[in-house]
Amino acid sequence: MKDVYKRAFSDGTTIGLGYLPVAVAFGITAKPILDLLATSLMSAMNYGGAGQFLTLQMLNDSSYIAIIIAIFILNSRMFVMSFKINYDLRHLNIVKRFMISLFVTDESFALTSRYGPERKTFADYLITVFVSYLFWVVFTIVGYLTGEIMSERLVIASGIALYALFIALLMPSLGSNVRNIIVAGLGMTLHFFLIEVGIAPGIAIVIAMLTASSVGLLLELRERKRGPVS
Amino acid sequence: MSVLVLILILTVVNVSIRVVPTFFVGKLELPENFVAFLNYIPIAALGVLVFPGILTAVETPTQGLLAGVFAAALGILRVPLFFIVVLSVAFVYVLMLLP
C-alpha cells in the first residue's frame, strides 16, 4: 500500500477509535426512541455527534422546527472549519473539495489542520475523513444491535475518548509558542463564561472560537510591529 | 410528519453549512492577516472543544479533569494519538473502580 494511503488510513482510524464508544452510546441511546433505519440514517446523513444527541433529546418534547434551528446553530461552527479546510485545499478542484467538506467534523478538522504542505492532498484528506465516518456509522449500528452486552462502566469511561484526542492534538502546538497557549486558554475561558451567561451552546462555540483567534492575530501583529523577537 | 422527513431536512442543513465555503473559497487569495487569523482557528477550536465539556464528559468533573491532565502528560511525552485515546479511557475506567 502506498505510504499516503497508509498514514491517512491510520489517522482516520485514530479518530474512528475516538468515535467508536460515542457511536455505540448513540446507538444505545437511540434504541428506545427510533427504529434501526432512522438511527443508521441519522448517523449516515446527519453526521455529527453532539447534534445527533441533541436531536434525540429534543425529539421527546420539541417541534421539528425547534430541532432544525437548534441543529443549525449548534453546527454553524462547521462553516468556519470548512472555510479553513477549503482555503488550505484551494489548489484542489471544486468537486474534490466538495467531497471532503461533506465529512468535516470537529475531530477531522482538528487532525487534518496539523497536516503539513506535503499532506494537503485529496487522498490524505478524503481517506482520513471517510475512514472516521465509516467508524461512526458502523458503530452506531453495532451499538444499536449489541448495546446491552457492553459494560455500563466502559461506556461511561469512553466519554473521555474525544477529549483525550482533542488534548493530544492541542499539546504539540502549545509547546511551540506562547501565543498559542493564550489563544487556547482564552477559547476555553470564553466558552465557559458564554455558556454560564446562557448563550446557546452552538453560538457560544463560534463566538469563543472567533474571538480567541482574533486575539491570536492581534498579538501576532503587535509582535511583528516590534520586530521579530524569536 | 415522519422522523425520516426530519432527518432529510437536517441533512440539507448539515450539508449546506459544510459545503457553502466550497463554492466561494476556490480561487480566493485572502489577505495575509486574514490567513494568520485562520491559522489560529484550530488551536482556538481545540481549546473551546475541551473546556468546559470535559467537566461533564464522564461521571464526575474531577475524573474528567484528572483524565485531561493524564492525556496532556501523554501528549507531552509524544505518545501516539491512538494510544493516548485508549489509555485515557482505561485511566477513567480505573478511576471509576476506586472507592
Image (spheres, coloured by chain):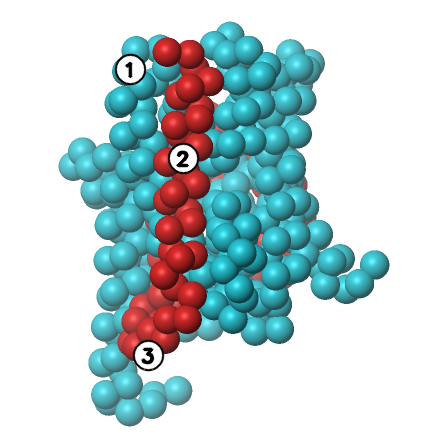
Chain colours: A cyan, B red
Q: Which residue is mark 3?
A: B32
Asked if the residues shown at circle 1 and circle 2 are in contact, with their CB atoms under 8 angstroms apart, the answer is no
Real-space Cα separation, disc 3 to disc 2, in angstroms: 33 Å
Residue at 51%, 8% in the rendered image: A32
Q: Which residue is mark 2?
A: B12
Query: Which amino acid is tagged 3?
Result: Glu
Say if B40 sits above or below B60 in the image. Answer: below
Query: Which amino acid is tagged 2?
Result: Val
**Host chain of mark 3:** B
Taking depth in this image into account, of B29 and A113 the one nearest to the observer is: B29
Asked if the residues shown at circle 3 and circle 2 are in contact, with their CB atoms under 8 angstroms apart, the answer is no
Q: Earlier in the sequence, mark 3 or mark 2?
A: 2
Q: Which residue is mark 1?
A: A62
Q: Are marks 1 and 3 on the same chain?
A: no
Say if A62 sits above or below A194 in the image. Answer: above
Q: Within the image, what quadrant is residue B29 found in?
A: bottom left
Q: Within the image, what quadrant is residue A58 found in?
A: top left
Say if A24 sits above or below B81 in the image. Answer: above
Callout 1 secondary element: loop
Asked if the residues shown at circle 1 and circle 3 are in contact, with their CB atoms under 8 angstroms apart, the answer is no
Name the spot of residue A185 as percent of width and height, x first: 32, 56
Taking depth in this image into account, of A97 and A159 the one nearest to the observer is: A97
Q: Residue furthest bottom?
A: A227
Name the spot of residue A6 as percent of width and height, x first: 75, 57
Residue at 52%, 45% in the rendered image: A103
Mark yes or no: residue A93 visible.
yes
In the shown orientation, is residue A161 left or right of residue A134? Answer: left
**Host chain of mark 1:** A
Taking depth in this image into account, of A23 and A41 the one nearest to the observer is: A41
